Image (spheres, rainbow, N blue to C red):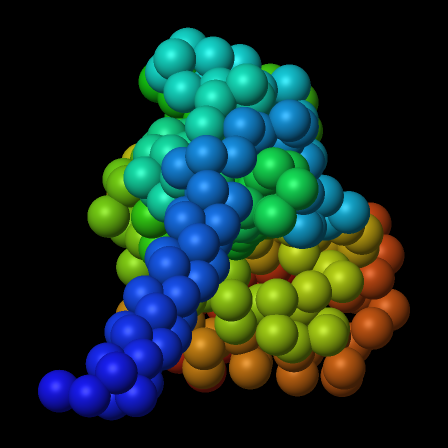
Amino acid sequence: MNPKTVKIIKIILSSICAAFFASYLVWAAVAGLGSDEVVCGSLVIDITDSDTYNFINNNDIKDKLSEAHIDPVGRKVSHNLADSVEKTINSISFVKNSECYIGDNGVMTLEITQRQPVLMVKTPVEDYYIDSERKKMPVSPHHTALLPVVTGRVKENMAKSVIFDLVKYLGNNEFYKNHIDQIHVGEDGDYFLGTKKGVNVIKIGTPDNIYAKLGKLRAWYEQYPGFAWSDKYRMVDVSYEGLIYATK
């Protein structure tokens, strides 16, 4: 092999080695800047729906992370750490979902969405909410949501089904939404609606054909507003088919 050929081979090998070494440096730099090597300098907590609900606050989140010994500040951040933070926060009863993001500067951002209650149940044993996914939700020491209140002989499965549907129906109807704020279940299973003004109590009876009864009630309000919106009658009963009874 002549010297010229040897020189060319050496140049090629040197170029390959240089390229390999440069690639290694790039990889090492990226790995060095990766999440496993960056220390979390601060935690930013964003409760996205805090304008609507205040079931939890930033201190609750920090306390929960401390109790679980997973406060990210001062730790080397990683995807495993972010997953652990999310799981810990998602275990809070008032949290619907959380997302954890890691910035290149070591700042960890935690976005939290709270659960959305639809109604409040008050019984002699306990008070609780039923949320938008028909799940039981505890009350909060920080905040009480202004929702229809359900009292009386209320069972949890009843609150999650027929009463949930009734509350949603009333809430989607502008007339009932502005007029009815309470549902009471009597000892015999009859339903009663509490109003904000006018006739105090509306007896619906058993929940069968309940929407037809509500339609009859609305017609009564429209045809006899002088009776419906005054304090002349204490209760109106629409539980009977084709009949309406008003009680003083």
Q: Is residue 223 left or right of residue 169?
A: right
Q: Of residues 120 and 60, which is closer to you in this image?
A: 60
Q: Of residues 31 and 215, which is closer to you in this image?
A: 31
Say which residue appears at 55% left-offset and 18% top-offset.
74
Q: Quarter of the image holding residue 112?
A: top right
Say which residue appears at 52% left-offset and 35% top-offset.
38
Number of numbered discs: 0
Q: Is residue 53 left or right of residue 184?
A: right
Residue furthest front in the image? 2
Q: Is residue 94 left or right of residue 135?
A: right
Say which residue appears at 51% left-offset and 66% top-offset.
168
Q: Quarter of the image holding residue 170?
A: bottom right
Q: Is residue 54 left or right of residue 141?
A: right
- The N terminus - image quarter: bottom left
Q: Position of residue 110 (x, y in %)?
A: 57, 42
Q: Position of residue 137 (x, y in %)?
A: 41, 37
Q: Position of residue 75 (x, y in %)?
A: 48, 22
Query: Is residue 45 at least partly visible in the picture?
Result: no
* Image height of 72 relative to 156, above or below: above
Query: Is residue 78 at least partly visible in the picture?
Result: yes
Q: Position of residue 155 (x, y in %)?
A: 27, 40
